[in-house]
Image (tube, helix red, strand yellow):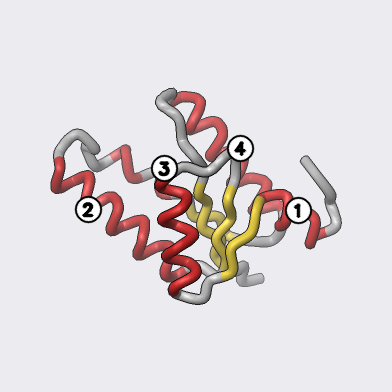
Amino acid sequence: MKRPFAYITAPWGGNEYENTENAARYCRAVYDAGFTPICPLLFVPLFLNDAIPQEHKDGIDIGRDFLRRAHVLVVCGHGVDETVKNDIAVAERLRITATTLDGILTVKGEGRS
């Protein structure tokens, strides 16, 4: 079965370990809801150094390219930061549906997690 891509965004904090755990949990929930999760936070830092300006920009570009290929943008976590706002704006401009993790789970009929 071919699953539609779902791009995961969230207001990531400063704790890399916590971000990774949360991202993996969000991806699992989206997968369980029938989508193929895309979360650059889980893999881009493995090969790009965010402290190098060009690599920081390249990481943003990689994320945007994946968002363009997604069927839906899933906003996870609590609150909204500039990254989430930018992801929502890009999705809106590209006419990609944006929803929350609760919205994805409710559609599937699982309710809240």
- Nearer to the camera, 56 or 48: 56
Mark 4 to mark 3: distance in Å? 17 Å
Foreground mark, 4 or 3?
Answer: 4
Mark 1 to mark 4: distance in Å? 16 Å
| Disc assigned to residue 105 | 1
Foreground mark, 2 or 4?
Answer: 4
Q: Quadrant of the C terminus?
A: top right
Q: Quadrant of the N terminus?
A: bottom right
Q: Are marks 1 and 3 in contact (CB under 8 Å)?
A: no
Q: Residue furthest bottom?
A: 95
Residue 45, position as x, y percentages in the image: 32, 39
| Disc assigned to residue 58 | 2
| Disc assigned to residue 78 | 4
Of pointers 1 and 4, the one earlier in the residue sequence: 4
- Label 4 CA crowd tier, 10 Å (few <14, some 14–19, many 20+): few
Report which residue position mark 3 lands on.
41
